[in-house]
Amino acid sequence: MSGQEKKVIVVMPAYNAEKTLRRTIEDIPQGSVAEIMLVDDCSADGTVALARGLGLTTIVHEKNTGYGGNQKTCYREALRRGADVVIMIHPDYQYDSRLTPTVTSLITNDICDVVLGNRIRTRREALAAGMPAWKYLANRALTILENTFTGQNLGEWHSGFRAYSRAALETIPWELNSDDFVFDQQLLHQAALFQFRIGDVPVPARYFAEASSINFRRSCIYGLSTLAVMFWVLLARLGLYRHPTLRPKKRT
């Protein structure tokens, strides 16, 4: 199957995204994806009505499942609908969705299995875009640590703009991952441990009132949880214990 024939599905884990959803959708280049699917996690605003009005495939959770729990529905449904590539775009307009075909092409052309958007091309650009200084420093510290630990060379490990091949999602046991924000880091460390090809592209990020961002306390929990993920990976690499989340569903 050629790159142009592969089915690309956008998934959007949504929570109170009414003010930013339309702009995010309008920036996705026409014809670059087969389907856009929004999974609403019990929003209190008009996100669901707007998504349906925009013609998006819309799935509504009956109860709030958390950021990771929302993504589990996203990936399960995208695979069920025959996606060859799944790209997650937050509907809060923080990431530049014009880059959708650039990101997915690295997978459809068999260059990468997982692709991230890198918000930190330079320190000046990231801070000028509104990234808080404490968040920038934490991002840099964790990214350096994770690159050293895994042997990767990613610009950042903490981007919410991500694309996955079907093979990656069918191998990584993401269903066992956390329902909280550390879900992203679990999935990325699983991909690295299973030796999937991971790459990134520069993506402008926007920080403003409506863009989602976890607070300092939740960020600290997220950082500590990331270190815990690395601890389990270390045990697996040393052959001491392989946590169920680090056991592939099948061999590629």
Image (cartoon, rainbow, N blue to C red):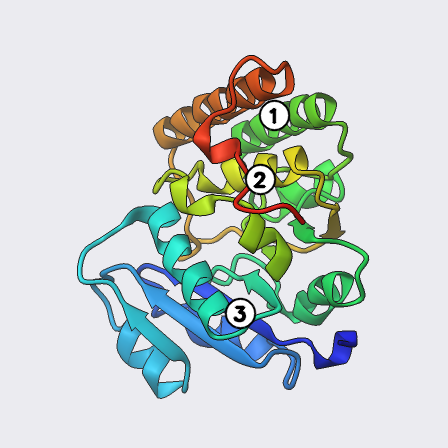
Q: Which mark is residue 224?
A: none
Q: Residue 46: x and y, percent?
A: 26, 73
From the viewer's perspective, is residue 210 above or below residue 82? above
Q: Residue 94: x and y, percent?
A: 53, 57
Give the CA separation, mark 1 to mark 3: 28 Å
Q: Residue 140: x and y, percent?
A: 65, 28
Specify few, some or many for label 2: CA neighbours under 10 Å numbering under 14, 14-19, or 20 or more.
many
Specify few, some or many for label 3: CA neighbours under 10 Å numbering under 14, 14-19, or 20 or more.
many
Residue at numbered disc 3: 10
Q: Residue furthest front?
A: 251
Are the residues tagged 1 and 2 within 8 Å (C-beta)?
A: yes
Residue type at mark 3: give it.
Val
Residue at 59% across / 17% down in the picture? 234
**Left or right: where 183 falls relative to 162:** left
Quadrant in which residue 106 is drawn: bottom right
Residue at numbered disc 2: 158
Q: Which mark is residue 142?
A: 1
Residue type at mark 1: give it.
Leu
Q: Residue 210: x and y, percent?
A: 40, 57
